[in-house]
Amino acid sequence: MDRHEYSALELREGIARRDFTAREVCETVFTRIRAWDPKFKIFLASDEQGAYSAATEVDRKLAAGESAGPLAGLPLALKDNLCTSGFPTTCASRILEGWRPPYNATVVERVKAAGAVLVGKVNMDEFAMGSSCENSAFFPTRNPWNPDCVAGGSSGGSAAAVAADLVPLALGSDTGGSIRQPASFCGVVGLKPTYGRVSRFGLVAFASSLDQIGPLARNVEDAALLLSVIAGHDQRDATSTDLPVPDYLLRLKEGVKGLKIGLPREFISAGIHPEIKTALDTAQKVFADAGVELIEVALPHAEYCLAAYYLVATAEASSNLARYDGVQYGQRVSGDNLLEMYAATRATGFGAEVKRRIMLGTYALSAGYYEAYYKKALQVRTLIQRDFEQAMTKCDLILTPTSPTTAFSLGEKTKDPLTMYLSDVFTTSANLAGLPGVSIPGGFSSEGLPIGLQLIGKAYDEETLLRTAYAFQSRTDWHTRRPAMEEAK
Protein backbone atom coordinates (compact mmCIF):
# COMPACT_ATOMS: atom_id res chain seq x y z
CA MET A 1 0.00 0.00 0.00
CA ASP A 2 1.35 3.41 -0.98
CA ARG A 3 1.68 6.02 1.75
CA HIS A 4 -1.08 8.23 0.34
CA GLU A 5 -3.52 5.35 0.90
CA TYR A 6 -2.82 5.16 4.64
CA SER A 7 -5.59 6.19 6.98
CA ALA A 8 -4.98 9.02 9.43
CA LEU A 9 -4.48 6.56 12.29
CA GLU A 10 -2.03 4.50 10.23
CA LEU A 11 -0.08 7.62 9.35
CA ARG A 12 -0.04 8.72 12.97
CA GLU A 13 1.30 5.35 14.09
CA GLY A 14 3.93 5.30 11.34
CA ILE A 15 5.15 8.79 12.22
CA ALA A 16 5.23 7.93 15.94
CA ARG A 17 7.28 4.77 15.24
CA ARG A 18 9.59 6.80 12.99
CA ASP A 19 8.84 4.52 10.03
CA PHE A 20 8.70 7.76 8.09
CA THR A 21 8.77 11.41 9.05
CA ALA A 22 5.97 13.98 9.06
CA ARG A 23 7.97 15.89 6.46
CA GLU A 24 8.02 12.85 4.16
CA VAL A 25 4.24 12.54 4.51
CA CYS A 26 3.99 16.22 3.65
CA GLU A 27 6.09 15.67 0.52
CA THR A 28 3.74 12.89 -0.58
CA VAL A 29 0.73 15.19 -0.14
CA PHE A 30 2.10 18.05 -2.21
CA THR A 31 3.36 15.70 -4.91
CA ARG A 32 -0.20 14.39 -5.27
CA ILE A 33 -1.73 17.86 -5.14
CA ARG A 34 0.52 19.00 -8.00
CA ALA A 35 -0.37 15.88 -9.99
CA TRP A 36 -4.13 15.75 -9.46
CA ASP A 37 -5.43 19.18 -8.49
CA PRO A 38 -5.27 20.55 -12.06
CA LYS A 39 -7.78 17.85 -13.06
CA PHE A 40 -10.19 17.94 -10.14
CA LYS A 41 -9.88 21.62 -9.09
CA ILE A 42 -10.00 21.04 -5.35
CA PHE A 43 -7.64 23.59 -3.76
CA LEU A 44 -8.18 27.34 -3.75
CA ALA A 45 -4.86 27.95 -1.99
CA SER A 46 -2.13 25.64 -0.73
CA ASP A 47 0.41 26.47 1.97
CA GLU A 48 3.57 24.46 1.33
CA GLN A 49 5.80 26.70 3.41
CA GLY A 50 3.51 26.59 6.44
CA ALA A 51 2.89 22.86 6.07
CA TYR A 52 6.59 21.94 5.87
CA SER A 53 7.31 24.17 8.87
CA ALA A 54 4.59 22.44 10.92
CA ALA A 55 5.77 18.97 9.82
CA THR A 56 9.38 19.78 10.72
CA GLU A 57 8.26 20.89 14.18
CA VAL A 58 6.39 17.61 14.69
CA ASP A 59 9.52 15.66 13.71
CA ARG A 60 11.61 17.76 16.10
CA LYS A 61 9.25 17.13 19.02
CA LEU A 62 9.12 13.39 18.40
CA ALA A 63 12.91 13.17 18.09
CA ALA A 64 13.22 15.00 21.40
CA GLY A 65 10.76 12.65 23.10
CA GLU A 66 8.11 15.37 23.44
CA SER A 67 4.38 14.98 22.90
CA ALA A 68 3.40 16.22 19.45
CA GLY A 69 -0.37 15.89 19.87
CA PRO A 70 -3.11 13.46 18.78
CA LEU A 71 -2.94 14.66 15.16
CA ALA A 72 0.87 14.77 15.02
CA GLY A 73 1.99 15.12 11.42
CA LEU A 74 -1.42 14.43 9.86
CA PRO A 75 -2.15 16.49 6.72
CA LEU A 76 -5.48 18.29 6.89
CA ALA A 77 -7.40 20.47 4.41
CA LEU A 78 -9.72 23.29 5.45
CA LYS A 79 -12.91 24.45 3.81
CA ASP A 80 -12.38 28.05 2.78
CA ASN A 81 -15.00 29.50 5.13
CA LEU A 82 -12.81 28.75 8.16
CA CYS A 83 -10.75 31.79 9.14
CA THR A 84 -6.97 31.35 8.98
CA SER A 85 -4.78 34.11 10.37
CA GLY A 86 -2.82 35.83 7.60
CA PHE A 87 -3.87 33.25 5.00
CA PRO A 88 -6.59 33.87 2.37
CA THR A 89 -10.18 33.06 3.33
CA THR A 90 -12.52 33.75 0.44
CA CYS A 91 -15.61 31.59 0.99
CA ALA A 92 -15.16 30.98 -2.77
CA SER A 93 -16.57 34.47 -3.36
CA ARG A 94 -15.22 37.42 -5.34
CA ILE A 95 -16.40 39.75 -2.60
CA LEU A 96 -13.79 38.30 -0.20
CA GLU A 97 -11.08 37.70 -2.79
CA GLY A 98 -7.70 38.43 -1.21
CA TRP A 99 -9.03 38.82 2.35
CA ARG A 100 -6.67 37.57 5.04
CA PRO A 101 -8.31 37.26 8.48
CA PRO A 102 -6.48 38.63 11.54
CA TYR A 103 -7.33 35.52 13.60
CA ASN A 104 -7.84 31.76 13.42
CA ALA A 105 -11.13 29.93 13.84
CA THR A 106 -11.29 27.94 17.08
CA VAL A 107 -11.20 24.64 15.18
CA VAL A 108 -8.10 25.81 13.33
CA GLU A 109 -6.42 26.64 16.63
CA ARG A 110 -7.35 23.23 18.02
CA VAL A 111 -6.10 21.14 15.11
CA LYS A 112 -2.85 23.11 14.96
CA ALA A 113 -2.33 22.63 18.70
CA ALA A 114 -2.97 18.90 18.18
CA GLY A 115 -0.09 18.71 15.68
CA ALA A 116 -2.03 18.67 12.39
CA VAL A 117 -0.26 19.89 9.26
CA LEU A 118 -2.55 22.34 7.44
CA VAL A 119 -1.93 22.01 3.73
CA GLY A 120 -4.36 24.61 2.41
CA LYS A 121 -7.91 25.79 1.74
CA VAL A 122 -10.29 23.87 -0.50
CA ASN A 123 -13.13 24.88 -2.78
CA MET A 124 -16.78 25.21 -1.82
CA ASP A 125 -20.06 26.66 -3.01
CA GLU A 126 -19.93 30.42 -2.49
CA PHE A 127 -20.67 31.22 1.17
CA ALA A 128 -21.66 27.53 1.53
CA MET A 129 -24.78 28.08 -0.57
CA GLY A 130 -25.14 25.11 -2.88
CA SER A 131 -25.25 21.36 -3.30
CA SER A 132 -22.71 20.77 -6.07
CA CYS A 133 -19.64 23.00 -5.61
CA GLU A 134 -20.60 24.64 -8.91
CA ASN A 135 -21.48 27.94 -7.22
CA SER A 136 -17.84 28.71 -6.44
CA ALA A 137 -16.82 32.04 -7.98
CA PHE A 138 -13.57 30.47 -9.19
CA PHE A 139 -14.25 27.01 -10.64
CA PRO A 140 -16.34 23.88 -9.97
CA THR A 141 -14.73 20.94 -8.21
CA ARG A 142 -14.94 17.61 -10.00
CA ASN A 143 -15.70 14.23 -8.46
CA PRO A 144 -12.66 11.90 -8.22
CA TRP A 145 -14.90 8.92 -9.09
CA ASN A 146 -15.98 10.58 -12.34
CA PRO A 147 -14.61 14.02 -13.32
CA ASP A 148 -17.74 14.69 -15.38
CA CYS A 149 -19.79 14.64 -12.16
CA VAL A 150 -20.08 17.08 -9.28
CA ALA A 151 -18.37 16.49 -5.94
CA GLY A 152 -21.43 17.66 -4.00
CA GLY A 153 -21.73 20.74 -1.85
CA SER A 154 -21.15 22.92 -0.26
CA SER A 155 -18.08 21.13 1.19
CA GLY A 156 -17.27 19.57 -2.18
CA GLY A 157 -13.58 20.45 -2.00
CA SER A 158 -13.21 18.85 1.43
CA ALA A 159 -14.89 15.60 0.32
CA ALA A 160 -13.00 15.43 -2.99
CA ALA A 161 -9.65 16.06 -1.28
CA VAL A 162 -10.19 13.02 0.93
CA ALA A 163 -11.66 10.84 -1.84
CA ALA A 164 -8.73 11.59 -4.15
CA ASP A 165 -6.25 10.61 -1.40
CA LEU A 166 -4.76 14.11 -1.36
CA VAL A 167 -5.25 14.32 2.41
CA PRO A 168 -6.55 11.83 4.99
CA LEU A 169 -8.56 14.46 6.87
CA ALA A 170 -10.56 17.58 6.07
CA LEU A 171 -12.89 19.98 7.83
CA GLY A 172 -16.15 21.16 6.33
CA SER A 173 -19.28 22.94 7.48
CA ASP A 174 -22.86 21.70 7.34
CA THR A 175 -25.89 24.02 7.24
CA GLY A 176 -28.37 21.72 5.52
CA GLY A 177 -26.27 18.73 4.48
CA SER A 178 -23.08 20.37 3.25
CA ILE A 179 -20.78 17.79 4.87
CA ARG A 180 -22.94 14.69 4.50
CA GLN A 181 -24.12 15.11 0.90
CA PRO A 182 -20.62 15.59 -0.64
CA ALA A 183 -19.36 12.77 1.57
CA SER A 184 -22.06 10.60 0.01
CA PHE A 185 -21.21 11.69 -3.54
CA CYS A 186 -17.47 11.11 -3.00
CA GLY A 187 -17.66 7.84 -1.03
CA VAL A 188 -16.17 9.09 2.25
CA VAL A 189 -17.35 9.55 5.84
CA GLY A 190 -18.81 12.96 6.72
CA LEU A 191 -20.06 13.91 10.19
CA LYS A 192 -22.24 16.83 11.23
CA PRO A 193 -22.00 17.07 15.04
CA THR A 194 -24.81 18.22 17.32
CA TYR A 195 -25.37 21.97 17.11
CA GLY A 196 -23.19 23.43 19.87
CA ARG A 197 -20.79 20.46 20.10
CA VAL A 198 -18.13 22.27 18.02
CA SER A 199 -17.35 25.98 18.26
CA ARG A 200 -18.43 28.11 15.32
CA PHE A 201 -16.06 30.96 16.22
CA GLY A 202 -14.18 31.85 13.05
CA LEU A 203 -16.61 30.07 10.74
CA VAL A 204 -17.88 32.65 8.27
CA ALA A 205 -21.60 32.59 8.94
CA PHE A 206 -24.25 31.47 6.47
CA ALA A 207 -27.18 30.62 8.77
CA SER A 208 -26.09 30.92 12.38
CA SER A 209 -28.74 28.68 13.94
CA LEU A 210 -27.97 25.86 11.51
CA ASP A 211 -24.22 25.99 10.74
CA GLN A 212 -21.95 23.36 12.27
CA ILE A 213 -18.33 22.37 11.59
CA GLY A 214 -17.40 18.70 11.24
CA PRO A 215 -14.87 16.19 9.92
CA LEU A 216 -14.57 14.35 6.62
CA ALA A 217 -12.37 11.25 6.50
CA ARG A 218 -11.89 7.93 4.72
CA ASN A 219 -13.25 5.90 7.62
CA VAL A 220 -15.18 6.22 10.85
CA GLU A 221 -12.10 5.89 13.09
CA ASP A 222 -10.41 8.88 11.48
CA ALA A 223 -13.58 10.96 11.74
CA ALA A 224 -13.85 10.04 15.43
CA LEU A 225 -10.24 11.06 16.00
CA LEU A 226 -10.73 14.48 14.41
CA LEU A 227 -14.02 15.10 16.23
CA SER A 228 -12.30 14.41 19.57
CA VAL A 229 -9.89 17.25 18.81
CA ILE A 230 -12.31 19.92 17.56
CA ALA A 231 -15.25 19.30 19.95
CA GLY A 232 -15.66 21.11 23.23
CA HIS A 233 -16.77 24.35 24.84
CA ASP A 234 -15.50 27.71 23.62
CA GLN A 235 -16.23 30.92 25.50
CA ARG A 236 -16.02 32.87 22.24
CA ASP A 237 -19.10 31.08 20.88
CA ALA A 238 -22.28 31.75 22.86
CA THR A 239 -23.94 28.68 21.31
CA SER A 240 -21.09 26.35 22.28
CA THR A 241 -22.23 23.79 24.85
CA ASP A 242 -20.19 23.18 28.01
CA LEU A 243 -20.42 19.38 28.09
CA PRO A 244 -17.67 16.76 28.51
CA VAL A 245 -16.19 15.46 25.25
CA PRO A 246 -15.90 11.66 25.20
CA ASP A 247 -12.94 9.84 23.71
CA TYR A 248 -14.81 8.83 20.58
CA LEU A 249 -12.23 6.22 19.63
CA LEU A 250 -12.35 4.49 23.02
CA ARG A 251 -15.75 2.79 22.68
CA LEU A 252 -15.91 2.57 18.91
CA LYS A 253 -15.61 -1.23 18.79
CA GLU A 254 -17.97 -2.12 21.64
CA GLY A 255 -20.69 -3.32 19.29
CA VAL A 256 -24.30 -2.36 18.73
CA LYS A 257 -26.27 -5.38 19.92
CA GLY A 258 -29.54 -4.25 21.48
CA LEU A 259 -29.64 -0.84 19.83
CA LYS A 260 -32.76 0.20 17.95
CA ILE A 261 -32.64 1.95 14.57
CA GLY A 262 -35.73 3.78 13.36
CA LEU A 263 -36.82 3.73 9.74
CA PRO A 264 -38.92 6.84 9.00
CA ARG A 265 -41.61 5.89 6.53
CA GLU A 266 -41.75 9.50 5.27
CA PHE A 267 -38.14 9.31 4.03
CA ILE A 268 -38.48 5.94 2.30
CA SER A 269 -40.72 7.17 -0.46
CA ALA A 270 -40.91 7.87 -4.15
CA GLY A 271 -38.08 9.93 -5.57
CA ILE A 272 -35.24 7.77 -4.31
CA HIS A 273 -33.16 6.20 -7.04
CA PRO A 274 -33.85 2.42 -7.09
CA GLU A 275 -30.18 1.56 -6.54
CA ILE A 276 -30.12 3.74 -3.43
CA LYS A 277 -33.25 1.99 -2.15
CA THR A 278 -31.46 -1.35 -2.73
CA ALA A 279 -28.42 -0.12 -0.80
CA LEU A 280 -30.69 0.97 2.05
CA ASP A 281 -32.37 -2.45 2.15
CA THR A 282 -28.96 -4.15 2.21
CA ALA A 283 -27.83 -1.90 5.05
CA GLN A 284 -30.84 -2.91 7.11
CA LYS A 285 -29.79 -6.55 6.77
CA VAL A 286 -26.22 -5.67 7.83
CA PHE A 287 -27.49 -3.91 10.93
CA ALA A 288 -29.88 -6.74 11.74
CA ASP A 289 -27.00 -9.24 11.53
CA ALA A 290 -25.07 -7.03 13.95
CA GLY A 291 -27.83 -7.37 16.53
CA VAL A 292 -29.67 -4.12 15.90
CA GLU A 293 -33.46 -4.04 16.08
CA LEU A 294 -35.08 -2.19 13.18
CA ILE A 295 -38.41 -0.49 13.81
CA GLU A 296 -40.62 1.88 11.87
CA VAL A 297 -40.93 5.43 13.23
CA ALA A 298 -42.94 8.46 12.14
CA LEU A 299 -41.71 11.96 11.35
CA PRO A 300 -45.08 13.50 10.40
CA HIS A 301 -43.74 16.92 9.45
CA ALA A 302 -40.81 15.66 7.36
CA GLU A 303 -42.48 16.82 4.15
CA TYR A 304 -42.10 20.43 5.33
CA CYS A 305 -38.38 20.21 6.18
CA LEU A 306 -37.06 21.53 2.88
CA ALA A 307 -39.48 24.47 2.73
CA ALA A 308 -38.82 25.44 6.36
CA TYR A 309 -35.08 25.11 5.86
CA TYR A 310 -34.98 27.37 2.81
CA LEU A 311 -36.86 30.07 4.67
CA VAL A 312 -34.88 29.93 7.92
CA ALA A 313 -31.51 29.60 6.17
CA THR A 314 -32.11 32.37 3.64
CA ALA A 315 -33.50 34.76 6.25
CA GLU A 316 -30.41 34.29 8.40
CA ALA A 317 -28.17 34.57 5.32
CA SER A 318 -29.82 37.88 4.41
CA SER A 319 -28.87 39.22 7.83
CA ASN A 320 -25.38 37.69 7.99
CA LEU A 321 -24.32 38.79 4.51
CA ALA A 322 -25.39 42.40 5.03
CA ARG A 323 -21.89 43.06 6.41
CA TYR A 324 -20.30 42.63 2.96
CA ASP A 325 -20.72 46.17 1.71
CA GLY A 326 -17.25 47.14 0.48
CA VAL A 327 -16.46 49.27 3.52
CA GLN A 328 -14.52 47.21 6.05
CA TYR A 329 -13.00 44.35 4.07
CA GLY A 330 -13.10 42.54 0.77
CA GLN A 331 -13.87 43.87 -2.67
CA ARG A 332 -15.06 47.44 -3.21
CA VAL A 333 -16.59 48.83 -6.40
CA SER A 334 -16.75 52.62 -6.58
CA GLY A 335 -19.99 54.56 -6.98
CA ASP A 336 -21.07 58.19 -7.05
CA ASN A 337 -22.35 57.92 -3.49
CA LEU A 338 -22.45 55.48 -0.59
CA LEU A 339 -25.61 53.64 -1.68
CA GLU A 340 -24.33 53.23 -5.22
CA MET A 341 -21.05 51.87 -3.85
CA TYR A 342 -22.96 49.35 -1.72
CA ALA A 343 -25.09 48.26 -4.67
CA ALA A 344 -22.20 48.01 -7.13
CA THR A 345 -20.01 46.11 -4.67
CA ARG A 346 -22.67 43.53 -3.86
CA ALA A 347 -23.87 43.19 -7.46
CA THR A 348 -20.32 42.49 -8.64
CA GLY A 349 -19.06 40.54 -5.64
CA PHE A 350 -21.89 38.06 -5.07
CA GLY A 351 -22.75 35.20 -7.43
CA ALA A 352 -26.23 34.38 -8.72
CA GLU A 353 -27.13 31.78 -6.06
CA VAL A 354 -26.03 34.01 -3.18
CA LYS A 355 -28.08 36.90 -4.59
CA ARG A 356 -31.07 34.59 -5.00
CA ARG A 357 -30.93 33.52 -1.36
CA ILE A 358 -30.34 37.04 -0.03
CA MET A 359 -33.41 38.27 -1.93
CA LEU A 360 -35.54 35.35 -0.77
CA GLY A 361 -34.44 35.84 2.84
CA THR A 362 -34.93 39.60 2.74
CA TYR A 363 -38.43 39.13 1.37
CA ALA A 364 -39.26 36.58 4.09
CA LEU A 365 -38.16 39.07 6.77
CA SER A 366 -39.83 42.12 5.28
CA ALA A 367 -42.76 43.95 6.83
CA GLY A 368 -46.03 42.24 6.05
CA TYR A 369 -44.42 38.92 5.20
CA TYR A 370 -42.39 38.13 8.34
CA GLU A 371 -45.21 36.31 10.11
CA ALA A 372 -46.44 34.55 6.98
CA TYR A 373 -43.03 33.14 6.07
CA TYR A 374 -40.16 33.36 8.59
CA LYS A 375 -42.27 33.04 11.73
CA LYS A 376 -44.26 30.19 10.20
CA ALA A 377 -41.03 28.41 9.25
CA LEU A 378 -39.79 28.69 12.84
CA GLN A 379 -43.05 27.16 14.07
CA VAL A 380 -42.66 24.27 11.62
CA ARG A 381 -39.07 23.86 12.80
CA THR A 382 -40.38 23.37 16.34
CA LEU A 383 -42.77 20.69 15.10
CA ILE A 384 -39.89 18.93 13.32
CA GLN A 385 -37.82 19.00 16.50
CA ARG A 386 -40.73 17.48 18.43
CA ASP A 387 -41.11 14.76 15.79
CA PHE A 388 -37.51 13.71 16.35
CA GLU A 389 -37.88 13.86 20.13
CA GLN A 390 -40.90 11.58 19.92
CA ALA A 391 -39.23 9.18 17.47
CA MET A 392 -36.09 8.99 19.60
CA THR A 393 -38.12 7.74 22.56
CA LYS A 394 -38.58 4.54 20.55
CA CYS A 395 -35.14 4.20 18.97
CA ASP A 396 -31.50 5.19 19.41
CA LEU A 397 -30.80 6.31 15.84
CA ILE A 398 -32.56 6.91 12.55
CA LEU A 399 -31.43 5.48 9.20
CA THR A 400 -32.09 7.19 5.85
CA PRO A 401 -30.38 7.65 2.51
CA THR A 402 -28.04 10.65 2.51
CA SER A 403 -29.20 11.86 -0.88
CA PRO A 404 -31.96 10.69 -3.24
CA THR A 405 -29.42 10.33 -6.07
CA THR A 406 -25.76 9.67 -6.67
CA ALA A 407 -23.50 12.44 -7.98
CA PHE A 408 -25.05 14.11 -11.03
CA SER A 409 -23.33 15.55 -14.07
CA LEU A 410 -21.73 19.00 -14.02
CA GLY A 411 -24.26 21.55 -15.28
CA GLU A 412 -27.19 19.15 -15.00
CA LYS A 413 -29.09 21.11 -12.34
CA THR A 414 -27.58 24.61 -12.42
CA LYS A 415 -30.51 26.05 -14.40
CA ASP A 416 -33.14 24.58 -12.07
CA PRO A 417 -32.54 25.71 -8.46
CA LEU A 418 -35.55 23.80 -7.09
CA THR A 419 -34.24 20.50 -8.47
CA MET A 420 -30.83 21.31 -6.98
CA TYR A 421 -32.42 22.04 -3.58
CA LEU A 422 -34.02 18.57 -3.58
CA SER A 423 -30.52 17.10 -3.16
CA ASP A 424 -30.84 18.13 0.52
CA VAL A 425 -34.24 16.53 1.12
CA PHE A 426 -32.88 13.94 3.61
CA THR A 427 -30.25 16.10 5.35
CA THR A 428 -31.91 19.40 6.29
CA SER A 429 -34.01 17.83 9.05
CA ALA A 430 -30.97 17.10 11.25
CA ASN A 431 -29.90 20.75 11.01
CA LEU A 432 -33.37 22.05 11.83
CA ALA A 433 -33.50 19.71 14.84
CA GLY A 434 -29.87 20.39 15.84
CA LEU A 435 -29.05 16.66 15.85
CA PRO A 436 -25.84 14.86 14.84
CA GLY A 437 -25.77 13.03 11.52
CA VAL A 438 -23.18 11.03 9.64
CA SER A 439 -22.96 9.84 6.04
CA ILE A 440 -21.14 6.54 5.56
CA PRO A 441 -20.21 4.67 2.35
CA GLY A 442 -23.06 2.26 1.63
CA GLY A 443 -22.46 0.92 -1.86
CA PHE A 444 -22.05 1.88 -5.50
CA SER A 445 -24.38 2.46 -8.41
CA SER A 446 -24.20 0.50 -11.65
CA GLU A 447 -22.26 3.48 -13.04
CA GLY A 448 -19.61 3.11 -10.34
CA LEU A 449 -20.66 6.15 -8.30
CA PRO A 450 -20.70 6.04 -4.47
CA ILE A 451 -23.93 5.73 -2.49
CA GLY A 452 -24.09 7.23 1.00
CA LEU A 453 -26.28 6.20 3.93
CA GLN A 454 -27.19 8.58 6.74
CA LEU A 455 -27.50 7.86 10.44
CA ILE A 456 -29.06 10.54 12.68
CA GLY A 457 -28.44 10.30 16.42
CA LYS A 458 -29.68 11.83 19.64
CA ALA A 459 -28.37 15.23 20.70
CA TYR A 460 -24.76 15.06 21.94
CA ASP A 461 -24.65 11.30 21.45
CA GLU A 462 -22.02 11.24 18.70
CA GLU A 463 -20.51 8.32 20.60
CA THR A 464 -23.41 5.97 19.74
CA LEU A 465 -23.66 7.45 16.25
CA LEU A 466 -19.99 6.71 15.49
CA ARG A 467 -20.12 3.29 17.16
CA THR A 468 -23.05 2.30 14.97
CA ALA A 469 -21.38 3.67 11.84
CA TYR A 470 -18.27 1.68 12.72
CA ALA A 471 -20.31 -1.51 13.19
CA PHE A 472 -21.62 -1.11 9.64
CA GLN A 473 -18.18 -0.26 8.29
CA SER A 474 -16.59 -3.31 9.93
CA ARG A 475 -19.08 -5.57 8.12
CA THR A 476 -18.69 -3.99 4.66
CA ASP A 477 -15.81 -2.94 2.44
CA TRP A 478 -17.28 0.10 0.68
CA HIS A 479 -14.97 2.48 2.58
CA THR A 480 -11.85 0.64 1.35
CA ARG A 481 -12.52 1.24 -2.33
CA ARG A 482 -10.67 3.98 -4.19
CA PRO A 483 -11.50 5.82 -7.43
CA ALA A 484 -9.50 4.62 -10.45
CA MET A 485 -8.23 8.08 -11.31
CA GLU A 486 -6.57 8.50 -14.67
CA GLU A 487 -3.25 10.28 -14.92
CA ALA A 488 -3.82 14.02 -14.97
CA LYS A 489 -2.89 15.69 -18.22
Image: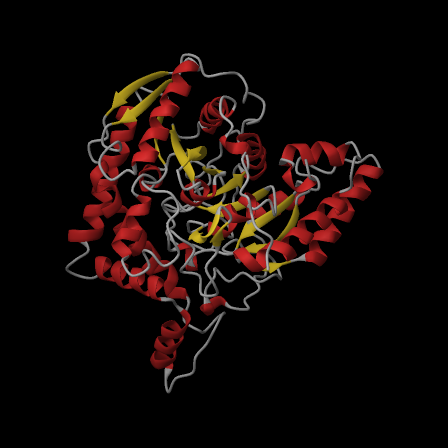
State the residue in front, 330 or 173. Answer: 173
- Identified at 52% across, 43% down, the residue is 235
| Quarter containing the N terminus | top right
- Residue 210 versus residue 148 in the image, above or below: above
Q: Is residue 69 left or right of residue 311?
A: right
In percent of width and height, residue 439 lies at: 43, 35
In percent of width and height, residue 39 lies at: 55, 58
In percent of width and height, residue 250 lies at: 58, 22
How is colour applied across the structure in the image?
Answer: secondary structure
In this view, the residue farthest toward the bottom is 336
Q: Is residue 284 left or right of residue 156?
A: left
- Residue 236 visible to an observer of this rendering: no
- Identified at 52% across, 38% down, the residue is 233
- Identified at 62% across, 62% down, the residue is 86
Please give the count of numbered marks on the rendered protein.
0
State the residue in front, 147 or 198. Answer: 147
In percent of width and height, residue 28 lies at: 70, 48
In this view, the residue farthest toward the right is 64
| Quarter containing the C terminus | bottom right
State the residue in front, 211 or 452. Answer: 452
In the figure, residue 435 lies in which quadrant?
A: top left
Q: Is residue 4 left or right of residue 371?
A: right
In the figure, residue 434 lies in which quadrant?
A: top left
- Residue 478 visible to an observer of this rendering: yes
